Image (spheres, rainbow, N blue to C red):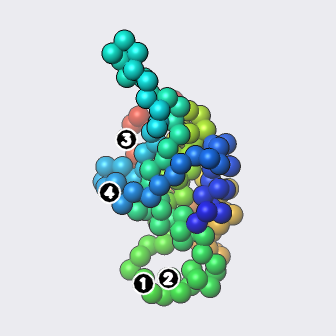
Amino acid sequence: MLTVLLSVLALAGAPTTTKVECDPALLAAADLGLTVSDQITVVDGRIIPGRLDHILLGQEACGGLLYASASPSERAEIRRMNPTVDFDQLLGVGLQVALHEANHVALDSADECLVEKRTRTQIVGLIEKVADPGRAVAEEAAATADDAGLPANYHGC
């Protein structure tokens, strides 16, 4: 998983020292991933967050990273053992979420529209690098469909 995660961070331009955690408590209906600052300063009673430097990924993003890290033979076995899992969705959406959160860190921005716009320019190339043979189009389609379902503040900038 580390190799794919480092590739995602590098593609976004986020430091390799970025703290990344899988957090199964993140509910897919609410958040697939979050990026926060581990640094907080209080000035005149106001809380001022520091640089965005800590990524929390939900199950789908962590599953996508883990699956992307498997060898072709391991992926075939994983698919065989899990016939009801949509691996195109898992890989496409999982990588997109991880890349989106890495872009929050790279840009040090909480602006969802700016971050998603950048993520969408990078995701196809990332998926093509790690796609299952013959599945890149379906995995890209899953990422695109997920993007289309995001709230309005992720689009239009």
In which quarter of the view is residue 5 placed? bottom right
Q: Which is more toward the observer, 14 or 68?
A: 14
Q: Are marks 3 and 4 in contact (CB under 8 Å)?
A: no
The residues tagged by marks 4 and 1 sit, at their Cα atoms, a distance apart of: 25 Å
What residue is at 53 percent from the left and 87 percent from the top? 77
The residues tagged by marks 3 and 1 sit, at their Cα atoms, a distance apart of: 31 Å
Q: Is residue 87 above or below residue 100?
A: below
Q: Quick one: label 1, few (<14), some, or many (20+) residues within 10 Å? A: few
As drawn, the label of residue 151 is 3
Secondary structure, mark 4, is: loop
Q: Are marks 2 and 1 in contact (CB under 8 Å)?
A: yes
The residues tagged by marks 2 and 3 sit, at their Cα atoms, a distance apart of: 31 Å
Q: Position of residue 140 (x, y in %)?
A: 56, 60
The mark nearer the N terminus, 4 or 1, is: 4
Q: Amino acid at mark 1?
A: Pro
What residue is at 58 percent from the left and 66 percent from the top? 1
Q: Position of residue 76 (x, y in %)?
A: 56, 84
The residues tagged by marks 2 and 1 sit, at their Cα atoms, a distance apart of: 6 Å
Q: Quick one: label 4, few (<14), some, or many (20+) residues within 10 Å? A: few
